[in-house]
């Protein structure tokens, strides 16, 4: 059940990580959304040993590409009791190792692509031979460090005054097409979307960092590591490519958010759209529900029926 099923080689791919079936409905709708917007590039699902047989069956019945990746963990454990999802997030760093591809764009499974964003496959990044020593190691959108839900275990410096997106409120037009400087605010990328030119040397740097005790101070796993190891040396994309649903909330970053410009919405925090019963308090969840219904309807017509 766990074999790779990669088709003839593509040089540029979308990838998404899955370790269990909790996010599988999200993943299937993400894959559907990529096809709906006419992306030229395939999605390859990166799965770990923990991904169960019924998950493989769901992917295979839909002819979704997949490949095995190792489950990464730091040598010095970090307690993520308050956010257990972060234990799985280290493995989102594996795309840097996929050197058989020229370009990998890693997406979280709780995303929904609303407009074609194939241009990410051609963003100018440092060539692999620069070994992660240049100023364009990868591309990502900023993390929002506002902590709008006021979670008590979040870092004390995660406040609106230290958020990169706050620096764009005075010029919302620019925010649609350009990210704030990679060192704006706390200078932390959000790990949900990473544009990567895979290189063994970069991956070795990442593995080297995972082997140090520094990781014990990383509150947000993979994105903390990338923000620390490559501080200021990444390309900051506009929010539209990783539009965290919380940015849209009144008083967070609704000053820059424009529904019509968003290319990829990211359903961070809980509940996920697929875990809700009844109408959601968040209007953006209706976008997911609507597309998911279309997916399920099309799958029914082709005879694909399972709990996902």
Image (tube, grey):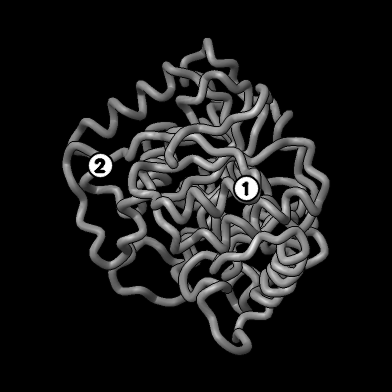
Q: Please tell me whether mark 2 sits on a helix, a strand or a loop.
A: helix
Q: Residue at x 52, y 59 (%)?
A: 24
Residue 150 against residue 67 in the figure, above or below: below
Mark drawn on residue 278: none
Q: Please tell me whether mark 1 sits on a helix, a strand or a loop.
A: loop
Q: Relative to the observer, which residue lies in front, 286 or 187? A: 286
Q: Relative to the observer, which residue lies in front, 238 or 211? A: 211
Does residue 85 appear left or right of residue 293 in this picture? left
Residue 287 against residue 236 in the figure, above or below: below
Q: Residue at x 70, y 61 (%)?
A: 303
Q: Relative to the observer, which residue lies in front, 31 or 166? A: 31
Q: Residue at x 51, y 54 (%)?
A: 143
Residue 245 image-quadrant placement: bottom right
Does residue 201 appear left or right of residue 252 in this picture? left
Does residue 216 appear left or right of residue 95 in this picture? left
Residue 113 against residue 246 in the figure, above or below: above
- From the image, state whether disc 2 or disc 1 is nearer to you: 2
Q: Residue at x 80, y 48 (%)?
A: 116
Q: Circle 1 is placed at which residue position?
A: 180
From this viewpoint, which residue is outermost toward the front?
Answer: 303
Mark drawn on residue 215: 2
* Crowd around label 1: few <14 · some 14–19 · many ≥20 (10 Å): many
From this viewpoint, which residue is outermost toward the bottom?
Answer: 278
- Earlier residue among tags 2 and 1: 1
In the rendered image, residue 53, in percent from the top left (x then y), is placed at 42, 51
* Viewer can see residue 148: yes
* Crowd around label 2: few <14 · some 14–19 · many ≥20 (10 Å): many
Q: Relative to the observer, which residue lies in front, 154 or 106? A: 106
Q: CA distance from mark 2 to mark 1?
A: 26 Å
Which image quarter is the C terminus in? bottom right
* Viewer can see residue 255: no
Residue 264 against residue 39 in the figure, above or below: below
């Amino acid at each position: 059940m766990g074999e790779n099923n990669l088709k003839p080689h593509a040089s540029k791919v979308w990838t998404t990580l899955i370790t269990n079936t909790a996010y599988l409905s999200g993943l299937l709708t993400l894959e559907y959304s990529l096809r709906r917007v006419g992306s030229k590039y395939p999605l390859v699902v990166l799965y770990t040993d923990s991904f169960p047989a019924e998950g493989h069956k769901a992917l295979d019945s839909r002819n979704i590409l997949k490949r095995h990746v190792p489950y990464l963990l730091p040598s010095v454990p970090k307690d993520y009791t308050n956010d257990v999802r972060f234990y799985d997030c280290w493995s989102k760093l594996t795309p840097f190792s996929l050197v058989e591809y020229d370009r990998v764009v890693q997406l979280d499974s709780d995303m929904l692509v609303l407009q074609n964003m194939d241009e990410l496959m051609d963003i100018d990044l440092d060539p692999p031979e620069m070994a992660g020593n240049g100023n364009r190691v990868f591309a990502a959108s900023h993390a929002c460090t506002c902590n709008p839900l006021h979670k008590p275990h979040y870092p004390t410096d995660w406040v609106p005054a230290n958020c990169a997106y706050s620096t764009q409120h005075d010029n919302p037009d620019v925010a649609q097409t350009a990210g704030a400087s990679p060192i704006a605010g706390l200078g932390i990328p959000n790990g949900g979307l990473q544009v990567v030119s895979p290189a063994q040397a970069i991956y070795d740097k990442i593995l080297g960092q995972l082997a140090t005790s520094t990781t014990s101070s990383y509150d947000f796993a993979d994105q903390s590591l990338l923000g620390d190891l490559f501080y200021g040396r990444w390309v900051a994309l506009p929010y539209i490519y990783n539009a965290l649903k919380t940015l849209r909330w009144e008083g967070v970053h609704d000053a820059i958010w424009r529904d019509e410009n968003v290319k990829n919405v990211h359903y961070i925090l809980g509940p996920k759209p697929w875990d809700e019963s009844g109408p959601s308090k968040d209007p953006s969840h209706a976008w997911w529900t609507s597309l998911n219904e279309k997916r399920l309807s099309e799958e029914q017509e082709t005879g694909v029926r399972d709990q996902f």
